[in-house]
Image (cartoon, grey):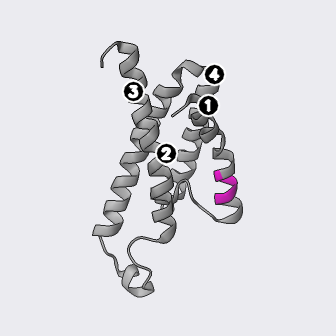
Amino acid sequence: MNRNILRIYYAATALFVSLDFGFDVNVRAAFLDSAPTLRVLFYVVLFGCFALVIWRPAWTNVVGLVESVVTLAALIINMALRSMMVTHDVFATEAGPVTMAELVNFMIAGSAAYVSYVQGLKSLTSRSGAD
């Protein structure tokens, strides 16, 4: 991912936070809906990533790589747990194990994290001289 695009993506965290807490539309951290404290911590980490890429532009791809690995792991674990561990609430509300918001979040955040991961790896391997 181009460094500027990654910076814009991290800057958009302010928009994601305002949508999440202001309008109850959670597209960036829907996988943490059941853990509000972790969701706030996740947003703080994203703001920290934004601060790092502004402070040290050369670190942008590395920051994106590390953040994307954490995001991908959290998304995959959450989606697996939500779809494999059916609870009483699923039957009581008939909402299904995975909500539409979680699927949209998985697609948006997962796609961005995957692209960031691949670009970060490509950047690191080109710096090290390995092909």
Magenta range? 16-20
User: Label 4's element?
Assistant: helix
How far apart are the two marked residues, 3 and 1, measured between alpha carbons?
16 Å
Residue 80 image-quadrant placement: bottom left
Residue drawn at 58 percent across, 60 percent down = 26
Between residue 59 and residue 128, name the one nearer to us: 128
Circle 1 is placed at which residue position?
Answer: 4
User: Label 3's element?
Assistant: helix
- 127 versus 43 height, above or below: above
Circle 4 is placed at which residue position?
Answer: 55
Q: If you read the primary sequence from the N terminus, does the residue marked by circle 4 or circle 3 appear first?
A: 4
In contact (CB < 8 Å): disc 3 and disc 1: no
Mostly what secondary structure, the magenta segment?
Answer: helix
For the residue marked with disc 2, what is the amino acid? Answer: Ala
Q: If you read the primary sequence from the N terminus, does the residue marked by circle 3 or circle 1 appear first?
A: 1
Mark in the foreground, 2 or 4: 2
